[in-house]
Amino acid sequence: MKILCIGRNYAAHAAELGNAVPEEPVVFCKPDSALLGKNLPFVVPSFSQDIHHELEVVLRIGKVGKHIEPRFAHKYIDAVTVGLDFTARDLQSELKSKGLPWEKAKGFDGSAVVGAWKSPDVLDGSDLEFSLLKNGQSVQLGRVRDMIHSPAQIIAHLSRYFTLKTGDLIFTGTPAGVGPVVPGDHLEGFLADDRVFSVNVR
């Protein structure tokens, strides 16, 4: 199982970080050790002083595929949820300033939260809304229709470079509103009106 991630997939988020809107998907990976275990807290790592939450729609691949056409991409999604791509923003900025890859800022242990899975039918019509509450307050709100690259386009693009296999996860990018987390915070992710994860920060 691999975790493939898309960066800068919402124009407002690209703007809030001072990044240009990409012409094609920005791709990075997380190792499977990045997955946060069910019901475990997220522990702020000692190597960062600026960990940010990034709420994202997550797709789970249901069968093997390569060179998938966008019109057939929906056939490869067997479940959908939302998750968190925790990012060590200070470390990421340092690595970017040196022209280095930023996997250390994205793929560290526990940096990937995945919520309870829902039917892929929730993507029908692409008007799906998702949100994040931090300590009971709304901090991120997104809609699938606002993605720069749609789920179908993402799957088609990724499958040009990587064979997609059963169980692979795709994080599709975060909307605006990313921000820091500190010990004591409580994070709740919603897919439409359904709460699909709850995480304590320590």
Image (spheres, rainbow, N blue to C red):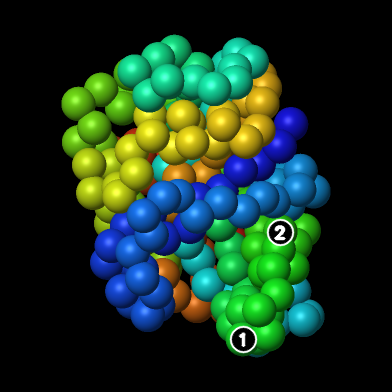
Locate residue 6, reporting x and y percent.
Answer: 50, 50
Locate residue 123, reporting x and y percent.
Answer: 31, 27
What amino acid type should be assigned to the residue bearing mark 2?
Gly
What amino acid type should be assigned to the residue bearing mark 1?
Ser
Quarter of the rendering containing residue 202: bottom right
From the image, tell me which residue sits under label 1: 97
Name the secondary structure under disc 1: helix
Name the secondary structure under disc 2: loop
Drawn side of residue 108 relative to residue 96, left or right: right
Drawn side of residue 189 relative to residue 146, left or right: right
Residue located at (36% from left, 71% from top):
20
Drawn side of residue 110 relative to residue 194, left or right: right
Q: Is residue 96 above or below residue 190?
A: below
Q: Is residue 12 above or below residue 172?
A: below
Task: Give residue 4's mark.
Answer: none
Q: How much space separates mark 1 and mark 2, taking CA atoms?
A: 18 Å
Locate residue 88, reporting x and y percent.
Answer: 63, 74
From the image, tell me which residue sits under label 2: 107
**Between residues 12 and 79, which one lies in front from this camera angle?**
12
- Res. 83 in view: no
**Between residues 87 and 182, which one lies in front from this camera angle?**
87
- Res. 134 in view: yes
Q: Is residue 161 above or below residue 14?
A: above
Badge 1: how crowded within 10 Å, few (<14), some, or many (20+)? few
**Between residues 87 and 94, which one lies in front from this camera angle?**
94
Locate residue 24, reporting x and y percent.
Answer: 41, 50
Residue located at (71% from left, 37% from top):
2
Q: Is residue 119 above or below residue 152?
A: above
Query: Which of disc 2 and disc 1 is earlier in sequence?
Result: 1
Badge 2: how crowded within 10 Å, few (<14), some, or many (20+)? many
Residue located at (71% from left, 59% from top):
107
Q: How many marks?
A: 2
